[in-house]
Amino acid sequence: MLENQLRNHDAFSVATLIYARLRRVSGRVIDALFLAENLDYARHVIQLAEQTQDPELSHLIQRLKMVLEISETGQGSEIEATNLSQQNELISVEPDEDDIYRAQVSHRYIGALR
């Protein structure tokens, strides 16, 4: 039981480092706590981090794989194939000028109403 707690603690520590670096590199935000607890989500985040091709993220991903004992082969390749097919089906939607204006205005006048 103590070994499992230490593993979760180490996984959470690495997950927070991945969170910070992934947000800096790609603007993606992940759930570090869920990453430390759920292997499927961890594999998904590993795939996202590998797509950035950032050397520091690659190092952190290797540490996470060691802590969570995720192998390089096996289920990961099946999950990657499924995720790639799902990503191809997604429609990319970019915000237009009205969306950008509404987002800026709502933050600008927070204290104006009393």
Image (cartoon, grey):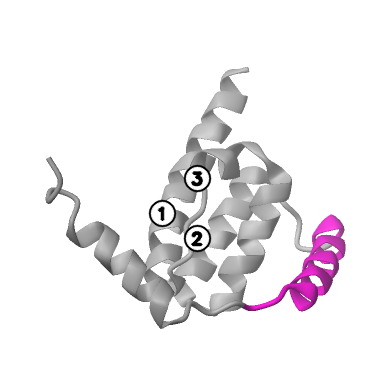
Q: Nearer the viewer, residue 104 or 113?
A: 113
* Label pair 1/2, CB-CB below 8 angstroms: yes
On screen, residue 27 above or below 35 = below
> Which amino acid type is shown beneath numbered disc 1?
Leu
The local crowd at label 2, few if under 14, some if 14 to 19, many if 20 or more residues have their Cα within 10 Å, is: some
Q: Quadrant of residue 43?
A: bottom right
Residue at mark 3: 32
Please give the label number shown on residue 60: 2
Q: Position of residue 42 (x, y in %)?
A: 65, 51
| Crowding at mark 3 (Cα within 10 Å: few <14, some 14-19, many 20+) | many
The residue type indicated by label 2 comes to Leu
Q: Residue at x 40, y 82 (%)?
A: 97
State the quadrant of the N terminus: top right
Cα–Cα gap, marks 1 and 2: 7 Å
Residue at 19%, 61% (x, y): give it: 108
Residue marked by disc 1: 17
Magenta residues span 74-92
Residue 75 counted in the magenta span: yes
Secondary structure under tag 3 reads helix
Q: Position of residue 29 (x, y in %)?
A: 47, 57
Q: CA distance from mark 2 to mark 3?
A: 13 Å
Task: Name above or below for residue 21 compared with residue 101.
Answer: above
Q: Earlier in the sequence, mark 3 or mark 1?
A: 1
- Residue 104 belongs to magenta span: no
Q: Earlier in the sequence, mark 2 or mark 3?
A: 3
How would you classify the magenta stretch by its main secondary structure? Answer: helix
Where is residue 67 shown, x and y percent of the image? Answer: 59, 45
Q: Residue at x 85, y 56 (%)?
A: 75
Left or right: 5 with respect to 40?
left
- Mark nearest the camera among 3 and 1 is 3
